[in-house]
Each structure stands twice: as C-alpha cells, then as structure tokens.
Amino acid sequence: MIKTSMKNSLEATSLSHLEVIQSMESFVSENLPQLLKTVDQSWQPASLLPQMEGQNWQEEIASLKNRTESLPDELLVVLVGDMITEEALPSYQTWINLLEGVGDIKGEGNSPWGQWSRGWTAEEKRHGDLLNKYLFLTGRINMFAVEKTIHYLIRNGFNPGTENDPYLGFIYTSFQEKATQISHKNTAVLSGKYGDSQIQLICGTIAGDEARHAKAYECFMQKIFELDPEEALLAFYKMMKKQISMPALLMTDGESPTLYDDFSMLAQKLGVYTASDYANILQDLVGTWKIADIPNLSGDSAKAQDYLCALAPRYRKLAERKGSSSLPKNKFSWVFNRI
C-alpha cells in the first residue's frame, strides 16, 4: 500500500512547484521499495530469449522463427514501432532530469528523485533490448531500416510540451505510461491469437512494468494534488489543452514523410492503441485524482475543473464518429515494404 501521509501539511498558495517537489523527497524515499523492483527481483531479457550459450540454441532460434511466421506484417510493424519508442529512452531520461526539482544532479547519489529516475530508466531499458533482439531473430525485419529509425528518433529529440515543470511532467508520464501499458497489453493479446506465445509473454511482461510505472507517477501526482490542489488542477488543464503528444512523434526512417502517422493509423486499425483508449485514460486520471471533488474553486480553476470532467466523454464521442477507417499512406521499410 503506497503511503500518502506527511507529518507537516503545506500551504499550497505559498509554495512554488519546486518547493512542493522538494518537500516530497521523504515521501518518495519511503515509497521507493514499492514503486521499483530490486535487480534480483527483476526479469532480464536473456530469460525470455533463446539461450545462445546452450547446446540447443539453433533449435531454439528455429522454433522462434517458426512461431513468428504466423504473425501478419501489420502486427510486426506495430511491434517494431513499440520497440523503437522504447529504444528512444535516452531522450526520456534527459527530459526527466530537466524537470525542476527532479533532476539527478550528481548522477549517482542518494537523492530520492535521482534514485527514482535511475531506477525507472534501468527497468525501462530492458524493454527495448528485449524487443529488439527478438525481432532481429525473426528474420522478417529490415533491421537496418529499424536502426536508422532509432538513430533518427534519438537525434530528432522529444518535446512533450511540459517545459521544465514537474507538475506537467508527472501528468504527462501518468498518461503516457498508461498508454504504453495498453499498447503492449493489446499487442500481447493479438500475438497470442496468431499463435506466438513467446512474444505474447514478452509484451505482457513489459505491460506489467508499464502498469507499475503508471501507478508510481499517478502516486506522485496524487500527492501533489493533496499539497497544491489548485495549481495541480491548472497544470492538468494546461497539459490536456495541449493534448498528449506521443514520444515517437518525430520518428522517421529517412524515406517516408508520414511514418509516425502511418504507424499510428495501423495501431488504431488493429486496436492496439486507439482514440477510445486516449479517452479512457483521461477518464481514469480524472477519477484517480478526484478532480470533480476538489472544493472551493472559482474563476479559472472552476472552469478548468468543468473542462476536465467533460473532456473524456467529448473525446469518446469523437472517437466513435471517426472510427478507424484511415489507412497508412506509405509502405513500411521496417518489413521490406511488404505492406
């Protein structure tokens, strides 16, 4: 059970965002054992891949390749897109370290926020490593095109529109980790339907990490709502007015000018991540942070409250009207332009 008590209550109106974040260090430290796993408790990619040092490594790879023959190219594209998103981790850690009060200044010290950001990064790094190796072993992926895309994406950068505001940053991560969890979970289900139990297990395992990370960021933001409710509400409003931009937005392979849009359309078509999911995540966060129950609001704050409480139903109606009729405009170099 994540602990939410704090000995000294804070007067939100007198504190900056930085001061609130600094005041949370003991809270973060106290909850870290529940938010992160130790190295010994954690899974590692090698446990979910063929054992190359074993005598039967050739048979294990042959079995992997046979299983993946049943996966349609559309699903492989989604797997590749998810993997590339995970592989841009250097951009995400850099961004977290730019959030005011959260940055890991020393890079190896005992600061609670530093321990969180390094621990989160260490857990996340396994996701791209695992998916990359698995997809390479299938023999069905143009790894040169994939590697170029990763190179471009890290070079192009990542701008979630949070500036260096930790409130905006934790709202973004609360949303984005949920979105990533949904994407991996749905990909796992589809992989199982097509007969590849191993990639089903892999995606399900990654989804489990993402679910735990989402809860951690929701926990941080929930504490901020307790300490500074009006400013937290206005930050949530500001972030949703901007809309949540996906981390791989600047993805390109150097050939297709619409690669990210095409990938997103395919994910929508397969039901891996849809506009309805966006609405559902928003509704979950509004409920988790009890936005409708924040008392004594007036002016801009009251308007922000009304806006946020009505936003998910609006997105849901829009998703129902739009459907998933859009199709990719270009073929994907990742699968040798087969689709």
Image (cartoon, helix red, strand yellow):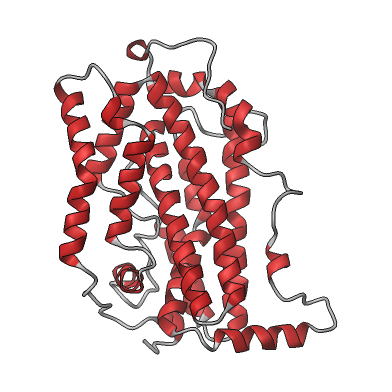
Seen from the viewer's position, the closer of residues 3 and 124 is 3
Residue 178 is at least partly visible in this image: yes
Q: Residue 324, position in %: x, y? A: 24, 71
In the picture, measured across the screen, residue 98 lies left or right of residue 50, that is left
The residue lying toward the viewer, choosing from 66 and 168, is: 66
Lateral position of residue 146 relative to residue 285, left or right? right
Q: Where on the picture, by quarter, is residue 179?
A: bottom left
In the picture, the quarter occupied by the C terminus is bottom left
Residue at 48% from the left image edge and 34% from the top image edge: 219
What x and y, as percent, mark residue 282? 31, 46
Residue 107 appears in the picture as rendered: no
- Image coordinates of residue 87 in percent, x first then y, are 52, 61
Q: Position of residue 89 (x, y in %)?
A: 52, 54
Image quarter where the N terminus lies is: top right
Of residue 144 and residue 200, the one placed in the foreground of this image is: 200
Relative height, residue 106 to residue 57 (above, below):
above
Residue at the (36%, 40%) spot, across then down: 285
- Who's the residue at 50% across and 31% down the image? 102
Above or below residue 212? Residue 223 is above
**Left or right position of 3 against 168:** right
Residue name at image x 73 percent, y 49 percent: 41
Q: Nearer the viewer, residue 127 or 146?
A: 127
Place residue 17 in its image quadrant: top left
